[in-house]
Every structure is written in structure tokens, then in C-alpha cells.
Amino acid sequence: MNRPHFSRLHRFLHWTIALCILLALFTAFLRATWMNGQEMATVITASLAEKAITLSNDDAKNIAKTIRSPMFQWHFYAGYVLVALLLLRFFDLFKNGAKFISSLAKGSPPKEKLQGALYIFLYAALTVVLIMGLLLKFGPKGDIHEVFEVIHVYGGVGIALFVAAHFAGLWLGENTTDKGIVSKMINGG
């Protein structure tokens, strides 16, 4: 397979988008697991109960939210940077073309069509997740807010699955027919 040359801009966007996605996924994972508000509230109330101090569950949740807030700010920072990077990436796509085969291209091998479809999925999911994230932060509250949150979370799960598939594909490629693809994305080829 004749792999394209990756420009400095393309490589910069690839790696910074990757780092921001990983940071956003990591902070979301922390918030949903170890730093879950209800779990932290339970630990806080149990610890205080050992010292004969009582605290309502709502107050404990507020304390938990205050504790995890600095960590979760990084989720927002990653999202804001991703918005700018995604706009730059779309500009680069339109200016310089895609570095992957379209999933609709006739005569392309199925593997390349799958890769193209996965990248289209990533850009679509990332666009939706970022729009929903901005609406969660700055949009209307109420029932629609919960809809935005569900779409944002499920889109994030889709992006996490893409990341796993991407790593699996890189490992497979490096160990079969696409040796050197990682170093090409580092040095441009």
C-alpha cells in the first residue's frame, strides 16, 4: 500500500487531537468511576459518621462536586481545544484532501473502505459530542439538557470505541503489512 506523506500540520493536528481526546475520555472516566459524586458522598458521610458528625447526602454530594471540580475543568479545557482543532482539521481536509480512502470509493480494498468509514465516524461523532458539550455548558437547561447529556455520553463511548479500534488497527498493521505507519505519523515519512 502506498501511504501518503503526512504534513507537519496534519501530524500536529493528529497528535494534539489524540491527546485532547484521551484527556477528555480520562476525565470523564474518573468522574463516572472513582470520582463519582454519589460514591464520594457515601465515603464522606461514612468517614464523618466515624467521628460522630452527621451530614446530609446533598451536602456530601456538594462537597464531592467541589473536590472533583478542578479535575473536571480539564474536561472542559480539552473540549474547547478540540473545537478549535476540529475546525482546523476540517480546513486541512478541504484544503489538502483526506489521507484516507472514502468508504464509498469504488474498487478500493475492503480494509481501506473500513478505515475510511471509521474516520468519517470519528469526525461525525466528535462533531456531535463537541456540539452537545457546548450546549450542555452554555445552552438551555431543563428537559432538553438531559437529552444533550445522553447524546454527549453515548458519543463519547463511540469515540472511546474508535480509539480502541484505532490502537488495535495500528498494532495489527505494525505486525503485518503496514510496518512503520506509527513512525510515519511521527516523522512524516
Image (cartoon, rainbow, N blue to C red):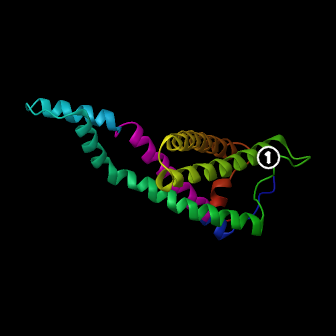
Residue occupying image coordinates x 31% and y 33%: 39
Determine which quarter of the picture holds residue 117: top right
Q: Is residue 29 magenta?
A: yes
Whole-percent x and y of residue 61?
Answer: 28, 39
Q: Tell me where the magenta segment starts and ends, as one range.
A: 13-35
Q: Locate residue 124 relative to residue 32 in the image: left or right.
A: right
Q: Locate residue 178 relative to residue 141 in the image: left or right.
A: right
Image height of 51 relative to 83, above or below: above
Q: Is residue 71 magenta?
A: no
Query: How many residues crowd mark 1 within 10 Å: few (<14), some (14–19), many (20+)?
Result: some
Can you say which quadrant of the picture contains the C terminus?
A: bottom right
Mark 1: amino acid: Glu
Prevalent SS, magenta region: helix
Image height of 62 relative to 8, above or below: above
- Of residue 160 and residue 165, the one placed in the foreground of this image is 160
Whole-percent x and y of residue 87?
Answer: 64, 64
> Is residue 162 visible in this depiction of the protein?
yes
Residue that numbered label 1 is attached to: 112
Which element type, helix, strand or loop, lies under badge 1? helix
Residue occupying image coordinates x 72% and y 49%: 120
